[in-house]
Amino acid sequence: MLIAPQENAGARFDNLIKSDESPWEEFLPELEDDEDDETEEWKIKNSSIELIIDKFKDNYKLNFNAAPEFKVIDKFKEYLLNLIEIKSVEDLVIEDLEEFFLVVLIHDLIMDDKQKLPDIADIFSQFLTYLEFNCDVSLKDSFDRFINTNIDQIARTLKMTRDYYKKHPLLNFLLSSKNDEEKLVEGFFEIAGKEDGCFIMEDIHLNLQFKPVDLSQLPVNSLKAGDILHVQLLMDDLIWRIANLEMIYPIKAKFYLY
């Protein structure tokens, strides 16, 4: 409190500061949440799956002309957005690419033999190169190692499935006496071995073993231990036989079928 009008208030204020032992707190204005939200939204928008894939397609058309494999790139976009619900390319990991090639893509290729796996793998390699240079997403080397190791196995199991469909159309099964849900056992069965000319198979989800299994409807010389058959089995004369085959997967796909 000032006693006289002429008293120096500045000196008194300095004394008060020196005698005040309370900690000094720096005042910082609070950031608005809306500003953070807008920044995050901008980042997502500019790295969105749809935007990046469309930009890649425009770039590819400009440099290499249009390619039929764009159909597969669009399928990949649909897989990312709708199946595993990834919105940003920054969230993409190698397992997503592996699952797409091992489980998703081959279903579309069963009835479409015009698109070749090497061509599809090449355009994906181009796409991942584009991501590496434009989005700092480094998956190309991992993808190249995966596809070089597994493309022959994917092609082999895909061919066996296609050949089965040509000889045993689905409609024939649906109209046959074999189509009896009460008698059928459906599952994902891994080839575990062979015994007395028949196969031993294990349900990868239930850990149940089935034997003997007659797989003579398939090219048995092309089958390998570890192959996984999504199939409906029917017991006939004490032997399990194929009632209907959905798909044959290479062993690498097992992790993604759970």
Image (cartoon, helix red, strand yellow):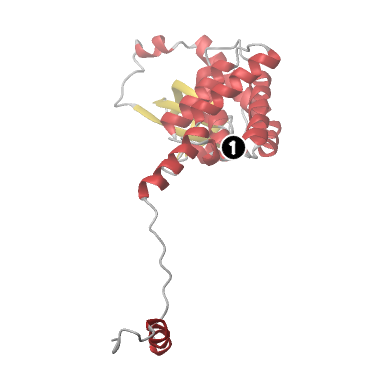
Q: Position of residue 169 (x, y in %)?
A: 46, 10
| Residue 180 visible in the shown view | yes
> For the point 50% across and 13% down, which residue is it?
165
> For the point 38% across and 58% down, which residue is it?
30
In the rendered image, the vertical position of residue 37 relative to residue 79, given as above or below: below
Q: Position of residue 85 (x, y in %)?
A: 43, 35
180 vs 56, left or right, is left
The residue that disc 1 covers is 252
Q: Position of residue 138 (x, y in %)?
A: 65, 40
In the rendered image, the vertical position of residue 69 relative to residue 82, given as above or below: above
Q: Amino acid at mark 1?
A: Lys
Mark 1 surroundings within 10 Å by alpha-carbon count, few (fewer than 14), some (14 through 19), many (20 or more): some
Which quadrant does the N terminus fall into? bottom left
Q: Position of residue 181 (x, y in %)?
A: 31, 24
Q: Which quadrant of the structure image shows residue 237?
A: top left
Identify which residue, 236 or 219, lies in the foreground: 219
**How many numbered tags mark residues here?**
1
In the rendered image, the vertical position of residue 84 relative to residue 3, given as above or below: above
Badge 1 element: helix
3 vs 117, left or right, is left
| Residue 116 visible in the shown view | no
In the rendered image, the vertical position of residue 10 relative to residue 206, given as above or below: below
> For the point 44% across and 35% down, which residue is it?
84
> For the point 63% across and 33% down, which residue is it?
131
- Residue sitting farthest toward the front: 6
Which quadrant does the C terminus fall into? top left
